[in-house]
């Protein structure tokens, strides 16, 4: 071993055995090569089947392939010269009928990504189009939209801001009842108006239908809620039942307190908010 | 698709052209040598050395034995394609901007620049392919008017010569009688390139007015128009698919004076009939000056201001593309 050689060269030359080529009986070849990939020696075994493909070319074209090199390439070895011919990076050509639209969209996305500071959108005050208000074709026929919105805002108590926003824009929970739609806050208040009892010491297997069955004899059950553990899916041991009538709820408390159900003794009382 | 990058030139490309068989590619640039390449592997066969100025144009005959080049040194030269030997030099009054062999290889046309008091001209020389000696006497000189011609091409049966002018006009000459058959204002800007369909019955022109258009040769009737968003330097038609390829982009000198969108140094594919853009190929980092499509339709080459030629062989997907109508 030559001591003056760099340790890197030493690694390259000393540890890579020569490639082996084994001719198999079925006409294939097995090539065993050793390479160093990321500092690790890798054995690469390839089974190769050689197939001769005949290509028909024009006689003149075949003749031209034998031309000797001249000019700046004179004397260079046959085959592409890496000084003048290299492979570029792969590019894609996806032909599509809608290429133009897709490209436009991509550009828009790119422009948006640049940031709002650069992206000064032109918005017409009359028709909300992307041109200057002065150039709007509806300038004379339409009253500017902002004016209309303001008028509406003054006339009705509906807030203009939420009106002009998208339907699916975020609205904080406490604002939700005010723009129409499902009145979540209200429904909670309404729910509490019904006489509600709390039943505790329920067994794990209790489901909503069991509670409804249990309470049906006392009166119409408006709502039955069984606390279910989200992880196990078992009952957490308590439930709330809302009745329509106050007397039914009273009767239920009376009968269910101390009632044996699923080998457990239930406890029934007024739920906190309806506390009486 | 992995393009082959041909780095044979040191200055902006001015023209790339396939031979009739599609196995050779000729390229010329503003450096003083023309290059000849094999298209299947991008190997350079050689360079044609002898010109003293920037080369503007190149063409070869149908049998790929003779090559003619036109340059800014006020000469056009004839070369033996196989050996790169120079056979003849034509001295012209000004730079030669476009050369093209006629379909029967008996003539070659040369478009000259308007400069130093000399008017622009379209010179037609007879080619004697049996001997290296060529006649220095033009068969015909056409004088384009009112403004100079930038490009010219042979029509079907070599009956006419179509010239494209600097002001965007097109003229159809019955060249043997030196008469103008038609003249039309085709574009609003300089015509940068003109490529005939293989039978010479219609052709595509590209222009600085950001459009490329298709014209019928016989009447110069406009057939189609393809809109780009920068000046178009070259347009080519693909033989197997009904597509056209446009190349262009903003010149570096114009970047600050035109739109904020930079670059657009792509080869853009349009449907020939429906005029819709259907795809594009990126790669160049300068405006594309010249595009050529292989006569077998299996690939195309683009030459750019950046000094590179990119030689593309289409993927199988390309041949499966169908426009739904």
Image (cartoon, coloured by chain):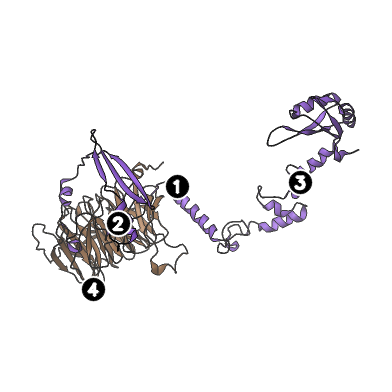
Q: Marks 3 and 4, Cα distance to the nearest angstrom?
A: 85 Å
* Residue A75 occupies quadrant: bottom left
> Secondary structure beneath disc 1?
loop
Please provide percent x and percent y for residue A69. 17, 58
Image position of B166 with respect to B314: above or below: below
Q: Secondary structure at mark 3?
A: helix
Disc 3 residue crowd, few under 14, some 14–19, many 20+, Cα 10 Å: some
On the image, the x and y values in percent for residue B239 come to 29, 47
As measured in the structure, the alpha-carbon distance from the residue carrying label 4 to the one carrying label 2 is 43 Å
Whole-angstrom CA distance, mark 2 to mark 3, is 68 Å
Instruction: Report the disc number at residue A177.
Output: 3
Decide which of A212, A174 is in the foreground and name it.
Answer: A212
A114 left or right of B169?
A: right
* Residues at marks 2 and 3 touching, judged by CB atoms closer than 8 Å: no
Q: Read off the residue under disc 4.
A: B118
User: Mark on residue A86?
Assistant: 2
């Amino acid at each position: 071993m030559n001591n003056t050689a760099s340790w890197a060269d030493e690694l390259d030359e000393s540890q890579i055995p020569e490639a082996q080529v084994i001719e198999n009986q079925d006409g294939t070849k097995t090539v065993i090569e050793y390479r160093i990939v990321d500092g690790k020696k890798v054995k690469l075994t390839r089974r190769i089947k050689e197939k001769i493909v005949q290509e028909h070319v024009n006689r003149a074209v075949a003749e031209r392939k034998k031309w000797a090199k001249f000019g700046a390439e004179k004397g260079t070895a046959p085959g592409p010269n890496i000084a003048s011919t290299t492979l570029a990076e792969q590019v894609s050509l996806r032909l599509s009928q809608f290429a133009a639209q897709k490209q436009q969209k991509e550009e828009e996305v790119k422009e948006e990504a640049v940031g709002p500071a650069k992206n000064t959108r032109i918005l017409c005050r009359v028709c909300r189009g992307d041109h200057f208000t002065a150039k709007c074709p509806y300038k004379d026929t339409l009253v500017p939209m902002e004016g209309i919105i303001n008028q509406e805002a003054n006339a009705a108590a509906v807030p203009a801001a939420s009106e002009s926003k998208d339907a699916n824009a975020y609205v904080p929970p406490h604002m939700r009842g005010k723009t129409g739609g499902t009145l979540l806050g209200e429904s909670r208040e309404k729910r509490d108006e019904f006489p509600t009892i709390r039943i505790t010491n329920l067994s794990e297997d209790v489901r909503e239908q069991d509670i409804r069955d249990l309470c049906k004899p006392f009166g119409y059950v408006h709502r039955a809620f069984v606390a279910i553990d989200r992880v196990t899916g078992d009952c957490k041991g308590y439930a709330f039942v809302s009745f329509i009538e106050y007397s039914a709820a009273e009767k239920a408390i009376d009968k269910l307190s101390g009632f044996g159900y699923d080998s457990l003794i239930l406890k029934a009382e007024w739920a906190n908010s309806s506390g009486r | 698709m992995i393009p082959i990058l041909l780095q044979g030139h040191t200055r902006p490309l001015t023209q790339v052209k396939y031979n009739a068989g599609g196995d050779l590619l000729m390229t010329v640039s503003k450096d003083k040598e023309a290059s000849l390449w094999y298209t299947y592997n991008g190997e350079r066969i050689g360079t044609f050395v002898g010109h003293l100025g920037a080369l503007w144009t190149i063409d070869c005959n149908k049998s790929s034995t003779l090559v003619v080049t036109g340059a800014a040194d006020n000469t056009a030269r004839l070369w033996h394609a196989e050996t790169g030997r120079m056979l003849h030099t034509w001295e012209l009054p000004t730079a030669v901007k476009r050369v093209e062999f006629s379909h029967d290889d008996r003539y070659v046309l040369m478009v000259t620049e308007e400069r130093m008091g000399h008017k622009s001209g379209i010179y037609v020389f007879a080619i004697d392919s049996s001997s290296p000696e060529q006649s220095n006497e033009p068969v015909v000189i056409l004088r384009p008017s009112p403004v100079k011609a930038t490009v010219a091409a042979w029509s079907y049966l070599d009956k006419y010569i179509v010239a494209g002018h600097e002001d965007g006009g097109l003229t159809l000459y019955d060249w043997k009688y030196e008469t103008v058959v038609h003249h039309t204002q085709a574009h609003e800007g300089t015509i940068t390139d003109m490529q005939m369909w293989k039978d010479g019955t219609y052709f595509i022109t590209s222009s600085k007015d950001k459009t490329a258009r298709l014209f019928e040769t016989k009447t110069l009737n406009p057939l189609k128009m393809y809109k780009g968003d920068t000046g178009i330097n070259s347009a080519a038609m693909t033989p197997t698919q009904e597509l056209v390829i446009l190349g262009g982009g903003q010149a570096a000198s114009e970047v600050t004076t035109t739109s904020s969108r930079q670059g657009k140094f792509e080869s853009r594919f349009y449907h020939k009939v429906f005029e819709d853009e259907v795809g594009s190929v990126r790669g160049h980092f300068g405006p594309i000056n010249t595009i050529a499509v292989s006569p077998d339709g299996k690939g195309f080459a683009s030459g750019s201001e950046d000094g590179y030629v990119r030689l593309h062989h289409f993927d199988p997907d390309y041949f499966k593309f169908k426009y739904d109508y």
